[in-house]
Amino acid sequence: MYNIVIIGAGVIGLSIAKAIGERTNDSVLIVEKEDSYGRGISSRNSEVIHSGIYYEPDSLKASYCKRGRELIYDFCSTNHVWMNKCGKLIVAKTHQIEDLEVLNENAKINGIRDVRIIDKKEIQHLEQNVDADLALYVGCAGIVSAHGLMTAFFKHSQTNDHDYLFKSRVVGAKQLSEGYELEIENANGEIEQVSCDWVINASGLESDLVAQMLGENFPSLKYSKGCYFKLGSKWRNVFKHLIYPLPDKALGSLGIHLTLDETQSVKLG
């Protein structure tokens, strides 16, 4: 019997476990289908710490992004997790000035600091290999080691005596009069029953399937696949900032952008 079972040991599941451990003495079990933590979509991303400039004012996305950014920077500084508050350039041509100004205004409304429109001369000063007429400089954006962050969350969780069950997946769930009973297929293919007061579904791409074990009144997932390509070693240390185009409204994406990692290698995607 556990107070809480968390399904999924990605960055969300691990951060929730960390928060529970800091605030309570509840018993926690984290169930993960892979052989270790952070092996799913949490390890397949740009590692960018976003500013919150794109989101609708007063929306949850805007407020969570802003607060989350501050918390990540603070946590990384305190726990010696690699990160780089490198800033971002959202580049544009002259005919796109109105779109850039709209984005700049949205940043102001959302309370994003250190954001300004810069001209070609300043762009060249910051990034001599970028050819653009204008750019929106966003100083609070950055990058983080996703694996370093998850490792720190995992260590915090372990210090609170949380249990981890790897190579295991939840195959059934039912709500009881008090709490829940889960069926878990372990690494040996055996089915175990675990009871708990609360279930937290942080199972990533399978979160809709897990939710449907308890009913049908849950939203379905909308998939969006991204691809990143790593540039050759000659481009290492060439760029100092994240480089983005204006958002692609037609496709609902941020467009093909340039990001960095801990080794200062460059990715496009």
Image (spheres, rainbow, N blue to C red):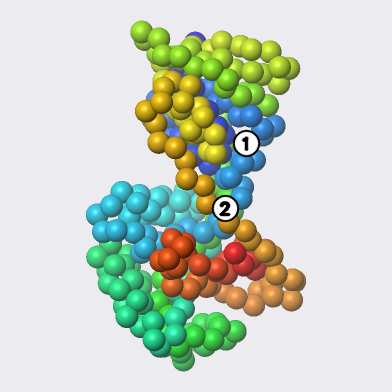
Relative to 73, 257 lies left or right: right
Q: Residue at x 50, y 33 (%)?
A: 207
Query: Mark 1: which secondary structure?
Result: loop
The label nearer to you, 2 versus 1, is 2
Please state the horizontal and vertical placement of residue 56, each as a whole percent of the image. 29, 58
Please state the horizontal and vertical placement of residue 17, each as a whole percent of the image. 48, 32
Name the image quarter holding residue 197: top left
Check disc 1: other Cα within 10 Å, few if <14, some if 14-19, many if 20+.
many
Q: Residue at x 35, y 51 (%)?
A: 61
**Which amino acid does the dot numbered 2 rest on?**
Lys
Q: Which mark is residue 225?
A: 2
Residue 83 seen anywhere in this rendered image of the structure? no
Q: Residue at x 46, y 27 (%)?
A: 211
Pick the residue in front: 222 or 122: 222
Give the residue number, with chain letter if any, for mark 1: 37
Query: Mark 2: which secondary structure?
Result: loop
**Which amino acid does the dot numbered 1 rest on?**
Tyr
